[in-house]
Amino acid sequence: MPSFEESDPAPISPSPAPELPSSQVHPATVSPTKHQKENDQDDDDFIPENKTKDDDGDQKMIFDDDNEEPELKSSTSEIEKPSIIQQSKPSSSKSSSSTTTTTSTKYKPSSADMKHYYERYLPFKSIFLWLNHSPAPQTDFTMREFAFEYKSGAYHRYNSFSNVSEFKSTVLKAEPTRFEIGAVYPIEPKLRKQVSKNVMKPQMKEFVLDIDLTDYDDIRTCCSGTSICEKCWKFINIAIEIIDVALKNDFGFKHLLWVFSGRRGCHCWISDYRARVMDENIRRSVIEYLDVLHVKGSKKSNGGVASLNMFRKPYHPHIERSLEVLKDQFIDVVIREQDPWRHEDRYEDLARAVPDYRLTNALMKYWKTTTDRSSADKWLDVDKYYQNLKIQSFDLQDWKKEMIFKTMYPRLDVEVSRQMIHLLKSPFCVHPGTGNVCIPFDPSKEKFNPLTAPNLQTLFNEDEEHVENTSLQPSIDLFNKYVRELMKEELSKKRTRDESKENLEF
């Protein structure tokens, strides 16, 4: 373990947690803008009006109104009758360790698989209650946007439904590979062409976060790209631990739903009323408070993340708290398991991160002549040369804290969280590239393992007709419990808000 000097925790490094809105609704005032992630994210690229990219980076057509809806399947030859379970062949994934199991099985569900899943497994009513916040349909659901992605690559936006029956029947008819959830608008999104564009501004939406393992490719060595394993998934579990505490303790949010993205990341849906009514300025403030590294949208340096100039004493309580989590796992997760600085193309990042040119040059010269040194050796070399050269330009222990923070702190996509018009894949959808179900999980109970997540193949093998007999049922039970707690609070606070409005009437 690296040694650390004690410092009195006190504000401030990132800005203080922004003040959140009370029960007053703050409709978004920022008009929709076109945005697309720089990297090929596996799930959640914001969809421009005319074109977008799917999980593999291919362009796909966009259908944004009812007149342009793609033709729905009807031929029995296309729907291959339940031979529902298709055999898939394992494919190799990059890994530096033979003991690490990667998600190497690539299984792409057929149309028949998806139809059967929607008919027998997907909990439409639970999703309806979650988004509607009441047993009876209300505008929280009926004026909410849904988007469908089709096997052909087409993408159909601005769907909306009057009730759960229409929701389910439309999905069954359309057979999308997945559907995504958007914001609540002043009118039903499917009627948007009947009103001025100025009217179509999002009014309400869950606050969401997106964490993706591809953003850790500069530090993980076991896998890269779409491949994952238990070793690199530890970065996601660490991120969840840090973000979950910050959202609850620093902002007071209670209703957090963590969901596996189906391939290489996870999403967090915050469903509290206070979170749903935040405008984009407040959303930006919240995500920027959490996004300490500024990995996306910032000029990268020192090993692939933005420079931590704000990492000064006295540390903000959020920084101090996060460091306590990170430093306990740094040696095992980064130094031993990932060993990122063993090879020349990586150890230069470590040397250049040192803020003293003499020390940087000495380390680079030594490491070029001793090619067999591990990351653990090089981490100790920094100590040794720091002492030998009598470096006084920076504090070594503070630098170590910064490096631990840079390599392990959560890497977030700011635009996913900030933009209310951003659509995000619904829980319980099936990832079209892996066949994995995007299940909710409770990080307070146990650390999530994506390699054991339900897959369509395994579910159909367990029971093709009854979801309660499958490994998906515990995730549905967890989701239903989350929805019940949310609705209980929602109905109680709605009565309070209604009573307050009545008291103000004359």
Image (cartoon, rainbow, N blue to C red):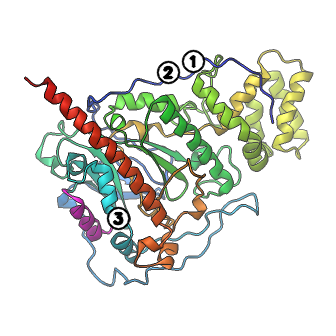
Instruction: Say if mark 2 contacts mark 3, CB within 8 Å.
Output: no
Q: Secondary structure at mark 3?
A: loop
Mark number, residue 12: 1
Looking at the picture, which amino acid does disc 2 mark?
Pro
- Whether 193 is drawn above or below 474: the answer is above
Q: CA distance from mark 1 to mark 2?
A: 7 Å
Q: Secondary structure at mark 1?
A: loop
**Residue 45 in the image: x percent, y percent?**
42, 49
- Whether 217 is drawn above or below 154: the answer is above
Looking at the picture, which amino acid does disc 3 mark?
Tyr
**What residue would you read off at disc 3?**
150
Asked if residue 232 lies left or right of residue 186, the reply is right
Question: For the residue carrying disc 1, how many other residues have a C-alpha within 10 Å: few (<14), some (14-19), or many (20+)?
Answer: some
| Front tag of 3 and 1 | 1
| Front tag of 2 and 3 | 2
Q: In this rendering, does residue 294 appear at all? A: yes
Image quadrant assignment for residue 400: top right
- Whether 49 is drawn above or below 497: the answer is below
Of pointers 2 and 3, the one earlier in the residue sequence: 2
**Residue 476 in the image: x percent, y percent?**
43, 61
**Residue 447 in the image: x percent, y percent?**
60, 52
* Residue at image point 58% right, 49% down: 213
Answer whether residue 90 is magenta in the image.
Answer: no
**What residue would you read off at disc 2?**
16
Q: Which residues are magenta?
A: 162-177
Instruction: Say if mark 1 contacts mark 2, CB within 8 Å.
Output: yes
Q: How many marks?
A: 3
* Residue at image point 46% right, 45% down: 268
